[in-house]
Image (spheres, rainbow, N blue to C red):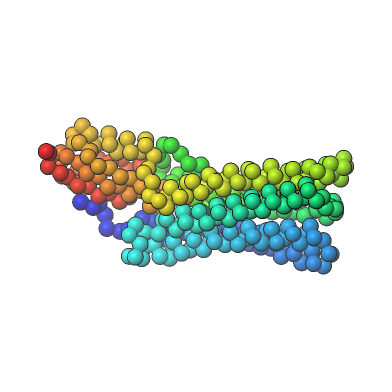
Amino acid sequence: MVSGHDHSFGQERKRPGERKTIIVIVLTAVTMVVEIVAGLVYGSMALLADGLHMASHAAALTISAAAYVYARRHASDRRYSFGTGKVNALAGFTGSVLLGLFAGFMAFESVGRIISPVDIVFDHALFVAVVGLAVNAISVVFLQGGHGHSKDEPNHDASDHDVHEDHNLRSAYFHVLADALTSVAAIVALLAGKYFGWVWLDPIMGIVGALLVGKWSLGLVRDTSAVLLDRQAPEPMVARVRSAIEPEARVVDLHIWSIGPGIYACVLAVEGPGDPASYAASIPEDLGIVHITVEVRARG
């Protein structure tokens, strides 16, 4: 018995993260163009470098936006067995890999500057860091709420699924948060270098920032790869489904996996006197299980 025949599962709706990501892309792109042009006109490598750095994040954010649009437009495409929900996780995984590469580049450049220090134009660099921090602060506000961490407990409200399990939005959030982190670290280090002569603090802060960004990247890789590889749902969710069926029937096989942000599919095999529809109806609706397949086996 399979409950329901519509396999889009709401993926055709425009998600809040799509609008938020597009707004952040516009903010990032405008700042990027201004910094690159200013760097070329005024001969400031600091401005040019930060502009190119923002360009890399604009590219990553564009991937996130494209994923939202693709998932929405192809939600009813029959080539996707369970809709396009996993496009969200795929984009989040791609963003997390890019985030990891960015962390590696930060660490590499910082170590290089420890070995071979370079002259810093403090006033220009401080201006770039302050402007970058302002833009990223605004971006973080837009994306706030989309960086939910992985949970060990199932969700209890349908609206929470999108917020906490939108890996695509989490990826975008971490990208702008990484930018904000580097801006704050740069401001602290540049002020210390300008007024106290602690030039060495600039690359040290870069390494610290790289380690933190790397941690975010690994966490997002773990969560998105679990979705892409159909890992079993959290144990509390599995236990609630099992307890809803037993003791009226014996659960002999149970698989629950994510097919999109906050939505799950379930395959269940039971031994008992009931019919498939009754067992499917007994599963709590607040778990976000939108596709249920039930097999009833005769008692052995």
Quadrant of the image occupied by residue 245: top left
- Which quarter of the rendered picture does the C terminus lie within? top left
Residue 73: percent from the left, percent from the top? Answer: 43, 65
On the image, the x and y values in percent for residue 130 come to: 76, 50
**x, y percent for residue 266:** 30, 47
Compared to residue 299, the image places residue 220 above or below, namely below
Q: Is residue 191 left or right of residue 83?
A: right
Q: Which of 265 and 105 is in front in this view?
A: 105
Q: Can residue 141 be seen in this view?
A: no
Query: Residue 19 at x, y = what percent?
Result: 54, 58
Left or right: residue 46 versus residue 224 is right
Q: Name, please, the residue furthest toward the front.
A: 115
Is 50 displayed left or right of 164 in the figure?
right
**Residue shown at the point (76%, 67%) measured from the top left:** 37
- The residue shown at (37%, 35%) is 236
Q: How many labels does the image show?
A: 0
Residue at x 37%, y 37% (from the top left corner): 235
| Occupied quadrant, residue 49 | bottom right
- Residue at 70% across / 44% down in the picture? 207
Frontmost residue, 176 versus 97: 97
In this rendering, does residue 229 appear at all?
Answer: yes
